[in-house]
Amino acid sequence: MILKSRRARKWALVVASALVVVLGAAITLFAVSKSRTFQFFGTLVDRVDTSEKVVALTLDDGPDPAGTQAILATLDARQVPATFFLIGREIAAHPDLARAIAAAGHEIGNHSFSHDRMIGVTPSWVADEVEATDALIRTTGYTGEILFRPPNGKKLFALPQYLAAHHRTTITWDVAPDSDGTPDAATVERAVVGQVRPGSIVLLHAMYASREQTRRAIGPILDQLKQRGYRFVTVSQLIASR
């Protein structure tokens, strides 16, 4: 009986240790999947280390009728270039708006076709998501490099492997005032102006009807940062300045 009891305790310890290892691995992978500064494969850029007062404004999702033209008008009035990370299915639904973004001279990036989280997916699914959206981006007339931003910033194995194999860059951000909820315009403005530093990549969600407050904040953000001596560039231009 004593021998059996010892064996039982030993196996219980082995099982407990294995569970701790598995739990630790799961926590680590979860942290990596949402990290803005690290991925297992390829190149990831969340900001650029520079002393020059340059900043890249990026806009995710869409194009959507609720916000695209208003955003373009705000950018045009201030002669500011931006990088739009567009969703493939939205380009297909609103090709005229996507063409308007390209015609205005802005950079267009790939934000996947479906905007599903790209974790626990197959390599073929990743390829379809990226390549279908690339093809749609080219129909807009945009001819520049196509950068990629993962939906919700989530990535783990299959997506970084695909991007690395195709010499593509993953773009995240270091300033994102409206990623969790829909704050009012003043809050968005205050957060961006307070957090931007030389080489920052700012993420805004301003395309959809529910994002009117963010749209209202764009003009004041641009004005204030310009007053502080910042110059706006596309993400590709920011990376090239390193």
Image (cartoon, helix red, strand yellow):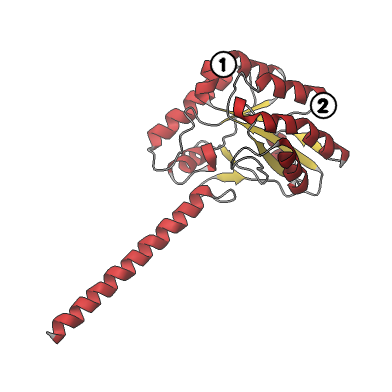
Name the image quarter holding residue 15: bottom left
Look at label 2 and name its amino acid.
Arg
Q: Quadrant of the N terminus?
A: bottom left
Residue 52 position within the rendered picture, expressed as x and y whole percent measured from the top left:
81, 45
Could you say which disc has been placed on residue 218 in the image? none
The outermost residue toward the top is: 96
- Indicate the amino acid at tag 1: His
- Residue 186 position by quadrant: top right
Task: Please tell me which residue lies in front, 165 or 139.
Answer: 139
Q: Is residue 87 left or right of residue 196?
A: left
Which residue is labeled 2 in the image? 78
Provide the residue designation for mark 1. Answer: 94
Pinpoint residue 205: horizontal percent, then vertical percent.
Answer: 63, 33
Q: Around disc 2, counting alpha carbons within 10 Å, would you say few (fewer than 14), some (14 to 19), or many (20 or more)?
A: few
**SS at badge 1:** loop
Is disc 2 placed on a helix, strand or loop? helix
Dots 2, 1 in contact, CB < 8 A: no
Give me the residue at 57% from left, 35% from top: 148
Residue 133 screen position, x and y as percent: 51, 25
> Is 159 situated left or right of 170 in this image?
left
